[in-house]
Image (cartoon, rainbow, N blue to C red):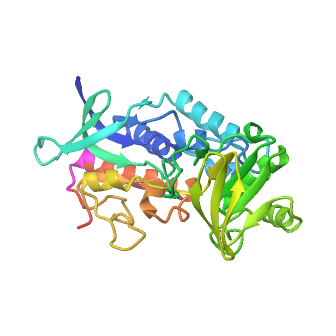
Amino acid sequence: METKHHTIIIIGGGPIGLACALEAQKAGLDYLILEKGCLVNSLYNYRVNMTFFSTSERLEIGGIPFVSNNAKPIRPEALEYYRRVAISHHVNIHLFEKVIDVKGAAEDGEQERYRVITNKNIYIADYLIVATGFYDIPYLLNVPGENLPKVTHYYKDPHFYAFQKVMVVGANNSAVDAALETFRKGAEVTMVIRGGQIGERVKYWVRPDIVNRINEGSIKAYFNSTVKEIREHEVDIQTLGGKISTENDWVLAMTGYQPNLDLLRKLGIQLSDDEIMKPVYDEISYETNVNNIFIAGVICGGMNTHRLFIENSREHAEKILLTIKARATQKLPSAAVK
C-alpha cells in the first residue's frame, strides 16, 4: 500500500461529507472523502419512493440550487442532485473504501498527524472530519430467527411483497410507509408496535392514512406488543392478551438505526455517560476532545438521531472549515474540548 498525504480526510460521503468537501475547496485546502459504500450511501438505501420532510432548498449544500418537480423532493431527485454536485465540482472522493483504523502519526513541528488505514490504502492527514451519519447499523430485535432470509431491516420497494403475508415491526415513518405501500400492492399486512399508538414523528400528511387503515381493519395492528420469535412460516407475538402465533412470509423490522459510535471511541472521542452517548465537541468549531478531529452532521447527536438533519447540520461544514483554514494557514494551536 502507498501512503498518501492530505490536509483533510473526511470520513463519510453523504450530503454533509460533500458539504465539507465543498467548503474545503473554497478554502483552497487539499482533502479526500472516504466512503465505505456508494455516493450518499444512506440516501441510496432509503426506500425507492421516499419523500423528504424538507423542501429542496433546505437540502442544498454549497449554495448550489436543488430544483425539484415536487413541493418536497423524492429520493431519485436527491440522488441526482448530490451526484451532479459531486460531478460538477470534481469532488475528490473514494467510494467503496472503508476506514478500518486510525492511528497517531509522527508530528510535523507542532502539528500532529493521523494515519488513516482503509481496506485499500493508507493515508496521512492533518485534520479529520467524521461525517458518518447513522443509517448503517439497525437496532436489532434480538429474537430467535432474526437472521432468517425473510427478515430485513432495509425496506426498498413494495412490489416484491405483493400478495404476501408481511409483518412490519415499528411505528414511525419507515414502518408506516412500508405498511401502507405493501398494503397497496396487495400484501396482507400486520404491524407489531411496542407502544400504544402510531409514532408522534410520523409525517402529518401520512398519519391519518395509517390510522384509518388500522381502524377499518385493512391493516392489522398489535399495539403494546413485541416479536418473540420468528420462524420460516410463522411469527410469535407477545401481546397484552398473551402470546399468539401468526402466519408470515416476510418480516420488515423497521426499528430504527444508530450511529457508528465504535469508530468515535476508536478515535478517542469522549461520549456522554447517559443513554444518548453524545460525542464531546466544541459547539462553535465542532472540534472534539481529540486535537484536529472534527465531527459533522447527525453523528453530533449521538443516539439522538432525530435532532439533526441535512437542513440543520449542513452549516457544520462551514464552521469546521473556518477553523481548519485559520489553523492551517496561521498555524494556530488546537482548541480541542477537554
Q: Is residue 223 left or right of residue 27?
A: right
Give coordinates of residue 251: x percent, y percent.
64, 50
Q: Which residues are magenta?
A: 328-333
Res 79 → quadrant: top right
Considering the image in quadrants, where does the C terminus appear? bottom left
In this figure, what is the number of numbered marks? Answer: 0
Res 216 → quadrant: bottom right
Give the residue displayed 26% in from the left and 33% down from the top: 123
Q: Is residue 188 left or right of residue 332?
A: right
Give the residue displayed 51% in from the left and 61% down from the top: 305
Front residue of 338 and 166: 166
Determine if residue 54 is in view.
no
Give coordinates of residue 131: x percent, y percent.
42, 49
Q: Is residue 122 magenta?
A: no
Give coordinates of residue 22: x percent, y percent.
47, 40
Give the residue displayed 32% in from the left and 58% down from the top: 287
Front residue of 287 and 159: 159
Determine if residue 4 is in view.
yes
Q: Is residue 140 left or right of residue 43?
A: left
Identify whether 142 is placed above or below 182. Answer: below
Considering the image in quadrants, where does the N terminus appear? top left
Give the residue displayed 59% in from the left and 38% down from the top: 44
Give coordinates of residue 121: x percent, y percent.
28, 28
> Looking at the image, which residue sits at the far right?
216
Identify whether 320 is placed above or below 224. Answer: above
Identify whether 12 is placed above or below 219. Answer: above
